[in-house]
Amino acid sequence: MRATRGKVLVAMSGGVDSSVAAAILRNDGYEVIGCFMRLGSPGDELIVKEGDGCNTRSLKVGHQGCCSVGDAADARLVAAILDVPFYVCNFREDFGRIIRHFVSEYADGRTPNPCIRCNDWLKFGKLKSYAQQLGADLVASGHYARIEQRDGRPRLMRGLDESKDQSYVLFGAAADAIGHMMLPIGGMHKSEVRERAKALGLPVFDKPDSQEICFVPDNDYAGFVERQRPELRVEGKIIDTAGREVGRHQGHHRFTIGQRRGVGVAAGSPIYVVDKRTADNTIVVGSREELYFESCTGGEAQWFVEPAADWTPCRAQHRYNSDACLAEYRVIAPGHAATQSGRSGRFEVRFAEPQFAVAPGQAIVLYGRDEPSLVLGGGWIERAVRKGKS
């Protein structure tokens, strides 16, 4: 039997990135096991636990992007071509937890990012445990990020292809999971990945990238949330920053901080959502200039370096599609060690220049000031301080 460099479980989504990741590892001498995470077929009802687990709620979801029936078939075909074992893991109940969190965040007036929770709770959480059951100590994926060894410790780094970098959505993976993580395409550009797939004869070489959130049909977030929480569809006021009523809306969950389109207010100049008051179901609109924030507080902190109690220079990214800006941070509550069950720990971030639409519920990820590719850590935005406010 041919000796291998080790056994690795590859999260195969059926896309070109994870397919090439699996091929690279196999060619590099690893014993590869392919795994597709079954999160539920289109129209499936997921039964999720609420509160203390005694109550349940049925969620009916749609699928697009990286977890459809067609994607499973593509992943199975690629595994066959690569001649590697292939498993389908039923994570429907665990996926229900992600959906429940998504709905709850919108109901509480925040803007969630379920892809980060999926990486944290499933790909490098639940799947890591499954890998160990199969005798694999390593879990790999097709994310555009890198793992580098620094002073004997693994560090999370940006991907080489800056336009595709996904380190932002990986920050939530527990620090101990990084040491068991492999990201084979992190040092490649997307064009190289497609060329490699074509050269290997993988039929997914020209498959389009997945877009938006996989479980929300037609990208209708508000409609999806309403189907789970119909009580949220309640008419409320739209007011300007002076307190004048300028319109009506059908539920605060239909709006996000910084939103311009679909606000439903006619004005002589562009109008944006600048605040959401969930307590009285009120939306506040104003000008773009009223959407700049000087600082924010992050919670559920996750660190890959020793965090600083004093103000320390860094770069901060507060949205997936935004650039990291110059900033500084300090820890204000260290918290306990990161675990799968939850994290504590809070920190403050001050931006060198005010940033647009810093929204509670989004992740804020910190990078090195002098080494912009190095991920220092991150957390979830709890509160943002508007320019000129305390």
Image: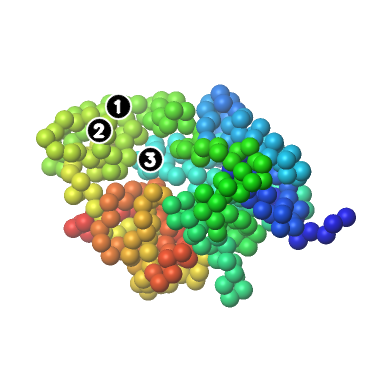
Please, what secondary structure does the residue beneath circle 3 have? Answer: loop
* Label 2 sits on residue: 263
> Is residue 144 among the parts visible in the rendering?
no
* Label 1 sits on residue: 250
Please, what secondary structure does the residue beneath circle 1 have? Answer: loop
Give left or right: position of 198 versus 298: right
Residue that lies at the very extreme toward the right in this rendered image: 1
Q: Amino acid at mark 3?
A: Asp
At which x and y percent is residue 169?
A: 49, 51
Q: Amino acid at mark 1?
A: Gln
Q: Amino acid at mark 2?
A: Val
Mark 3 closeness class: few <14, some 14–19, many ≥20 residues within 10 Å: some
* Label 3 sits on residue: 108
Residue that lies at the very extreme toward the top in this rendered image: 43
Mark 2 closeness class: few <14, some 14–19, many ≥20 residues within 10 Å: some
At which x and y percent is residue 213?
A: 47, 37
Check residue 291 in the rendering and tell me which mark sits there, or answer none. none
**Sequence-wise first label, 1 or 2:** 1
